[in-house]
Image (cartoon, rainbow, N blue to C red):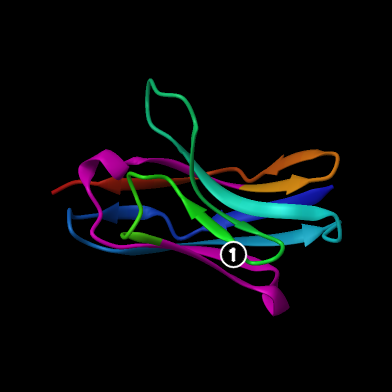
Amino acid sequence: QVQLVESGGGLVQPGGSLRLSCAASGRMFDILAMGWYRQAPGKQRELVASISSGGTTGYAGSVKGRFTISRDNAKNTIYLQMNSLKPEDTAVYYCNARRTDGNSWGQGTQVTVSS
């Protein structure tokens, strides 16, 4: 099992920035990729950004150019730098680890973009 703990959410004005962190622990050796998902009220959970074990990154079209995913292998932590935030980015953001035998999820962190 892999345990994931997110932090860094909060309330920010449109155009502002936030950085989310996800610290991983436990069985790390079979993680294929890690990523950030989000779920807004009444909507399905969607993939925002991902980073593979080899370092390849991917982004949803709605966040490309505004969000950046990165990782610190020494700290077993991934980050999501979110710039130029919009009200439609408001959601609960979840960290995900895709393993060879399934997925692990964090508890989620709320991001609210509002004036």
Residue 81 screen position, x and y as percent: 41, 65
Q: Residues within 10 Å of mark 1 (few under 14, many from 20)?
A: many
Residue 67 screen position, x and y as percent: 38, 59
Taking 103 as reference, is 6 above or below it? Answer: below
Residue at x 46% of width, y 25% of height: 44
Q: Looking at numbered disc 1 in the image, what kind of residue is underneath it?
A: Ile
Residue at x 49% of width, y 31% of height: 45
64 left or right of 96? left
63 left or right of 113? right
Residue 87 screen position, x and y as percent: 22, 43
Direction bottom: furthest residue: 74
What range is drawn magenta here? 68-95
Taking 114 as reference, is 16 above or below it? Answer: below
Residue at x 65% of width, y 54% of height: 34
Direction top: furthest residue: 42
Report the front residue among 89 and 114.
89
54 left or right of 47? right
Question: Is residue 85 on the magenta stretch?
Answer: yes
Corner quadrant of residue 52: bottom right
> On the image, numbered disc 1 is attached to which residue?
78
Residue 54 screen position, x and y as percent: 70, 65
Report the front residue among 62 and 109.
62
